Amino acid sequence: MSGQRALLSECGHPQQSVLMPELVHAAYYRDSYRAEPAHCELTVCDAFHAIFMHRPTWMKFIMLGRNYLMSMFGIAVPDKTEIMHPRMRSDYKVGEKIGAWPIFYLSSEELVAGRDNSHLDFRLSIVRVQEQQTVAIVVSTVCICHNWYGRAYIQLIRPFHRWGVKYLIRQAMLAGRL
């Protein structure tokens, strides 16, 4: 197990990402995690499925609670089914949803999904990076805040987000999905 944990590390946002460097550097919050998957043939959609479509039930309930609170402030949130029973498909197009998030960009090397709201816009990027003899998957989150509410929200969820993303990647690796 410790060998797999060493294959997950924090990193910078990949230069080959379609998310412009100006946007990434201007973001109020950003993070990136690099994982070396056991399965080099994984597509970016496969990597998304492996990481984000296998959340434990306790995490799903936390997300439902967060969504309930956010909806009280008029913020658009995924519906309960998208959280509790996400639908996996084999084929996606820009504009469709993967899990609970609309896809903004999709190629063989990168998937960008996210959501635009009044308080902040966020993007989740999964980049497949070919490095000599290895393949790496880089999972990045970029948040652009529009107001004090967005900044307060990020400050509140930052530690949970950072821990949660690393937890989901690590679990996908340990389960052999990634």
Image (spheres, rainbow, N blue to C red):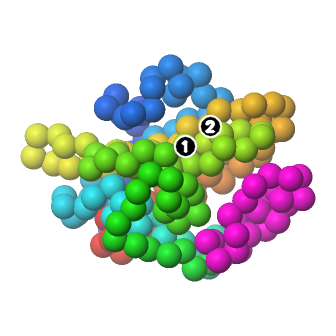
Q: CA distance from mark 1 to mark 2?
A: 7 Å
* Residue at image point 39% right, 62% down: 92
Q: Position of residue 38 (x, y in %)?
A: 23, 63
Q: Are marks 1 and 2 in contact (CB under 8 Å)?
A: yes
In this view, 143 is above or below 137: above
Span highlighted in magenta in the image: 61-83
Task: Return the residue nearer the eye: 129 or 165.
Answer: 129
Q: Position of residue 114 (x, y in %)?
A: 57, 49
Confirm whether residue 154 shows in the render.
Answer: no
**Residue 143 disc label:** 2
Q: Splitting the image into 4 quarters, where does residue 178 fall? A: bottom left
Q: Splitting the image into 4 quarters, where does residue 90 fall? A: bottom left
Q: Position of residue 128 (x, y in %)?
A: 28, 47
Q: Is residue 19 left or right of residue 116?
A: left
Q: Is residue 137 left or right of residue 102?
A: left
| Residue 79 counted in the magenta span | yes
Identify the residue position indicated by label 1 in the image: 123
